[in-house]
Image (cartoon, grey):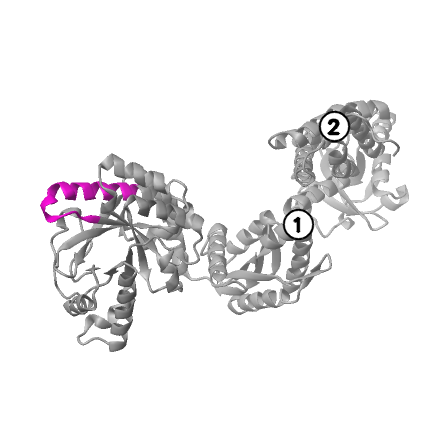
Amino acid sequence: MTAEPDGPEDRLRRFATIWSRAVYPVTSTSLTRPEFEALLLPLARRLSQALRARSFDAAEGKAVGAALVAAHCTDPDALSRALDCVDAYLVLYCGGDGSQEGLRTRSSRLQHAMSAGYAQALRDRTLAEQEAIARAALQAQGVVAQALHASEARFRAVFEGAAIGISIADLDGNVLEVNGAMLRMFGGSEQTLRGRNVRDWTHAEDAPQVWRLYEELVRGDREHYHVEKAYYRPDGTVLWTNLTVSLLRDADGAPQYQLALMEDTTERRLLNLRLRYEATHDALTGLPNRTLFFERLEKVLSSGQGQRFGLCYLDLDGFKTINDSLGHAAGDRLLVEVADRLQSCATAPGEMVARLGGDEFVALTTGPDTQREVDELAARIMNALVAPISVDGRELTVRGSIGVVEGEAQERSAAEVLRSADITMYRAKSAGGNRFELADPEADARAITRHGLTTALPAALERGEFFIEYQPLVHLGDGSVHGAEALVRWLHPQHGVLGPDRFIPLAEHTGLIVPLGRWVLEQSVRQAGRWHERHADSGPLRINVNLSPCQLTHPGLVQDTVEILERTGVAPEALCLEVTESALIGADDDLLKPLRRLAEMGVDIALDDFGTGYSNLANLRRLPVSILKLDRSFTQSMQQFPADPVDLKIVEGIVSLAHSLDLAVTVEGVETGAQAEQLRILGCDTAQGWYYARPGPPERLHELALVDATG
């Protein structure tokens, strides 16, 4: 290669030249090489445009693959050489200044699309050729039959000039005549074929009906049949054919000869096998891919009673970190090594390993005793990952999480089995990874329910399925209702009323917590305004609303709160936002800034579940909080009187510290009168719990029960 081409068009032409030189020697075209290059140039331009297009269009690659078949590039090497050229030179000459990694990925996808288009076009062409051959066979049968009865000379002309292999045998199967085309197909001499008996040409891959059809024909019960059949050539290689055998009758209609017409399909079959292999195997690791794995699993699950299966679903722990830090090339080499190790773990009959994609692999075992075998297989996989893997001079430690499913065939579908394995694998990962877990139907059901709830959450908010209950906050000094905490509930159409512990974590995971939290805040503040209108003479009632950590980091928190207060006409002092202690552990100034702005407006900030985290008590000075809410774990021992003196000292110390910092103290989980009295003596300001009232509708706010909940 001399000087680098100047412009994009020169580069495109250079690519077309290289492509034509590589593919031309294995084409069946009557064009000269320059003419063939001119034919490839618009195809090269289509690939170049598809490479740099804003979005990927597989149709472009498929069209180029089909165009190669139309240009008579049907030799098995033609597609391989074309793909090699695209892989090596398309990005180099047509990529421009784009991201090399992105262009490489796009080029790979184009190559897959070309293969698909090529295979489909070749399949259509083959079907068309087969129809033409069938017509020619019937035509040849008629011509040969007439020639046998009319003119030996005419028969010889048709027989020897035919482009397909023809042989004639008697009804005992002895070969009497073979033409030149058949001799070339078998690669032997006329002596090696003539005189042989048709029944000697058996092959291990003969379909069961081949010889039954043959016997029916020579008995005169059948006029012809058509099959795909393999033969051994004299040199031991295999010849695959489309075979049509017809019965020839004499002038009186009695069976006399059998006529065989053969088309050599060996190369086409090899190409189809190669395309099938590429379609069912992972290009990177060579393992069976998702398509082939599902075919095998479905076959296993549909097998007879008494058959069992075991499946290990593996996901590598921390692979994304390796991929991001060392690059995709290093990640690919790691996956290849992992694939080799997994392959060495599944060598017994009935075992297979496949790559589903990314860093996900599956291992399958079958047989009557898979309960024991699948555990052993999972253990072998874990042991295979223990030794570090060397990539680019680095020793990388790889671990994996495995979900194991075992059961009897015919009980579940392939999709259900894989879903159970996937759920179980994530359970292993959630437990810390580097382990395998066995599938648990109850855990599966919970996970499926969680998934269903997660999916239904957005529509539930739109349909108004959420509602709010309120639990009174009682002043311990005089027993008056000081305010209420808003607690959101979900009235699910199938599962009934769900508490926040069932859906708030799901809302946080999906991001729906922000609009849901905004709705709860607005509804609660509006309710506080209605209380103020009805009970203005009993003093202002404060509404406590919980904030999730996700809401704390949302940029619209302050603006949403201000707008809601202004729309409802409620004073900021009537609102208290509760934030868990764990959410503020190690919080920086950026996280605290919105809380400080709200506190400066007059909104109270309460530190919820205080005492359950590991925050430094000195940090209380820098947090913009005005209330501490003691976790219920501090007051459980106070349900009986007298209470544990150690617990009393702890609560007394916290209350003293809080008051010294001008912080009010609220206690959760008050269930007995004894607790309430002890907390009043210790100086706590407000309390809530079932002793006073369970959460309920807003109109019941002032209905206090004052009944020991433990009784």
Vertical comparison of 202 with 374: above or below? above
Instruction: List the residue tagged with mark 1.
Output: 327
For the residue marked with disc 1, what is the amino acid? Answer: Gly
> Does any portion of residue 584 appear in the rendered image?
yes
Vertical comparison of 304 with 373: above or below? above
> Does any portion of residue 134 appear in the rendered image?
no
Tell me the element at label 1.
Answer: loop
**Quarter residue 127 falls in:** top right
Observer-nearest of 265 and 572: 572
Residue 431 at x, y = what percent? 47, 63
Q: Are marks 1 and 2 in contact (CB under 8 Å)?
A: no
The residue mark sitting in front, 1 or 2, is 1
Residue placed furthest toward the left:
537
Residue 368 at x, y = what percent? 53, 66
Tell me the element at label 2.
Answer: helix
- Per the rendered image, the range of residues in magenta is 519-542
For the residue marked with disc 2, what is the amino acid? Answer: Ala
Label 1 Cα neighbours within 10 Å, binned few <14 / some 14-19 / many ≥20: few
Magenta residue check for 73 = no
Q: Is residue 501 left or right of residue 263?
A: left
Q: Is residue 703 left or right of residue 241?
A: left
User: In 3D space, how far apart are the residues under numbered discs 1 and 2 (Cα atoms)?
Assistant: 30 Å
Instruction: List the residue tagged with mark 2.
Output: 44
Q: Determine which of the numbered discs, if any, sits on residue 237 in the image.
A: none
Observer-nearest of 622 and 44: 622
Chief SS of the magenta region:
helix
